[in-house]
Image (cartoon, rainbow, N blue to C red):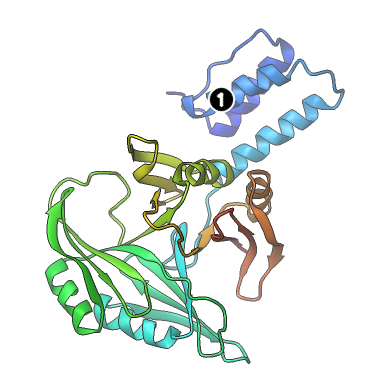
Amino acid sequence: MSKQPDFDQLDLAVTDILADENVLPSVEASFADLVLIARDLSVMPRPDFKAQLRSALERTTSMSTKTVQFREGFRTVTPYIFLPEADELITFVQKVFDGVETGRSAHESGAIHSEVRIGDSMLMIGGGPSYKGPRKPALLRILVANCDEVYQKALDAGAVSTLAITENYGERFACVRDRFDNQWIISTQIGPAYAEGLEHNLTTFIQVRGAARLIDFVKRAFGAAEVMRADGPEGQVRHSIIRMGDSVIAISDAHEETTSPLQLYLYVSDVDGWYDRAVRAGAQPSYPPTDQAYGDRGAGVTDEWGNFWYMATPL
């Protein structure tokens, strides 16, 4: 494995290709596809090709390797739940999952935005009585020390059991639905994890019709990578774990005909670059990159399933 920095590897590779298109430089496996594309494109006749190719590869390298200083407590992916009963959901999360509200802001309309830390993860909750839009419930796996105890706390707080405590996949877990329609997979690790990346306290599950297309979209739009995937006999995605930065999400095909779109907050290295990339991957632009008063430069896109992806880079 090369010990050269990623940028240096690509810079030397592009230099070799531009000198002789028959050369196929040796680089890290993760950049092999870029090098093949560069070699194929290098014979194009446009006079400005060399400069554009170098600029594009430099930008791709920057997007994939630049580190981001997240706000305290945040990781790459944070689920965001909107509902009129925002205050009540905050109380539920505090009571059942020992959530700690770390920040809150209120709009003059009465709408609120709250950030609640659960272990090593954050959950955003927004809305309030003035919120007239649809609920945006989430399906979340929450990793706890004692699922039996937390499961009972959830039931005592008004949640309804959708799966009694069971053991499988190296976990002891149960499922509940709170009265706001959010679903919680309450899990305790009891054996080897069935996939990497599940050690964090919160993992977002996304269920859609056409999960394979969504997986392809997040790969193209956000540089995501498959950790594991189990497909059914007819090509449906039964379960998958997809890495995005320092987080994972789980994507599968929905059993129901209709599903509720989600909202996710993504910390990225270069919001302008990732916004452009997401739009090129087929997302609909919601609003362009804009500096925000709370300290992030943010932008938003919506995928074909209605999921809203809010991207941000700290200023």
Residue 13, by quadrant, is top right
Residue located at (18% from left, 73% from top)? 150
Residue 132 place in picture, x, y as percent = 57, 83
Quadrant the C terminus occupies: bottom right
Residue 4 place in picture, x, y as percent = 51, 28
Residue located at (41% from left, 70% from top)? 123
**Is 123 on the left-hand or right-hand side of 197?**
right
Q: Which of the two residues, 143 or 295, is positioned nearer the viewer here? A: 143
Residue that sits furthest to the front in the current view:
257
Query: Mark 1, residues whose alpha carbon is within 10 Å: few (<14), some, or many (≥20)?
Result: few
Q: Which residue is mark 1?
A: 33
Quadrant the N terminus occupies: top left
Which amino acid does the dot numbered 1 rest on?
A: Asp
Residue 62, by quadrant, is top right
In the image, is residue 303 above or below residue 115?
Answer: above
Q: Which of the two residues, 204 or 134, is positioned nearer the viewer here? A: 134
**Is 11 on the left-hand or right-hand side of 131?**
right
Q: Which of the two residues, 52 or 253, is positioned nearer the viewer here? A: 253
**Is 199 on the left-hand or right-hand side of 30?**
left
Q: Which of the two residues, 190 or 8, is positioned nearer the viewer here? A: 190
Residue 22 place in picture, x, y as percent = 66, 7
Residue that sits furthest to the right in the current view:
47
